[in-house]
Amino acid sequence: MMKKLVKAGLLAVTIPLSSCGTDADSGRTVHSTDGVYPAVGPYSQMVQAGDLYFLSGVIPLNSDGNAVQGNGIDEQTRQVLDFISEKLESQDMTLGNVVMSTVYMTDLGEFADMNGVYGEYFSEQPPARATVEVSRLPRDVKIEISVIATQ
């Protein structure tokens, strides 16, 4: 992706608290915000394609990305949803713009606790959702959530 940007002569533009880069060939724009830990691998925090925004999975790290925040599923779910909110706010959106979420959990036995916190953030007209149990998540966290939003 970065090679295409360089070949096309496009550069990532830094905006206060966020940045973006456009790939003219694909019509995609990559966004990021300094309020959330940086990508810890070869992926973008958020990619816009038309009116859709695809947010990569968020795990409960601190804002520097070097330590897990929260021990229990309640705390970790709050941290993740706060980061998702911050990413959306960097593009003048809220959780109300989310149309789909995917929740990955290492223990569906904690589903009720996660769901209680999730319901606080998505209290009215919640998005479509899939929740799946996985054997392990990065940094041994309990939860990861990715979302798709629209403006």
Image: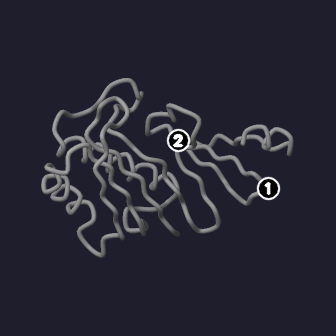
Helix or strand or loop: what does disc 2 sit on?
A: loop
Q: Quadrant of residue 126?
A: bottom left
Q: Please identify, in this view, whether the residue under mark 1 or under mark 2 is nearer the observer.
A: 1
Q: Residues within 10 Å of mark 2 (few under 14, many from 20)?
A: few
Numbered circle sitting on residue 24: 1
Image location (x, y in percent) of residue 62: 34, 31
What residue is shown at x 18% (from left), y 33% (from top)?
A: 71
Quadrant location of residue 67? top left
What quarter of the picture does the N terminus occupy? top right
**Residue lying furthest front:** 135
- Point out residue 38 in the picture as x, y percentages from the top left corner: 50, 34
* Residue 19 figure quarter: top right
Q: Residue at x 28, y 43 (%)?
A: 79
Single out the residue that lies furthest toward the bottom.
Answer: 125
Q: Residue at x 14, y 50 (%)?
A: 109
Apparent side of residue 133 relative to residue 32 in the rendered image (left or right): left
Q: Are marks 1 and 2 in contact (CB under 8 Å)?
A: no
Task: Note whether 26 is above or below 57 in the view shown.
Answer: below
The amino acid at mark 2 is Leu
- Residue at figure coordinates x 63%, y 62% from the top left: 49
Q: Provide residue 31's location: percent of width, then percent of height.
A: 59, 48
The numbered mark at residue 32 is none
Neighbours of disc 1 within 10 Å: few (<14), some (14-19), many (20+):
few
Q: Is residue 105 left or right of residue 26?
A: left
Reading the image, the residue beneath label 2 is 17
Relative to 105, residue 130 above or below = below
140 over 93 or under it: above or below: above
Looking at numbered disc 1 in the image, what kind of residue is underneath it?
Answer: Ala
Residue 134: where, in percent of width, then height?
31, 45
N-terminal-most mark, 1 or 2: 2
Q: CA distance from mark 1 to mark 2?
A: 23 Å
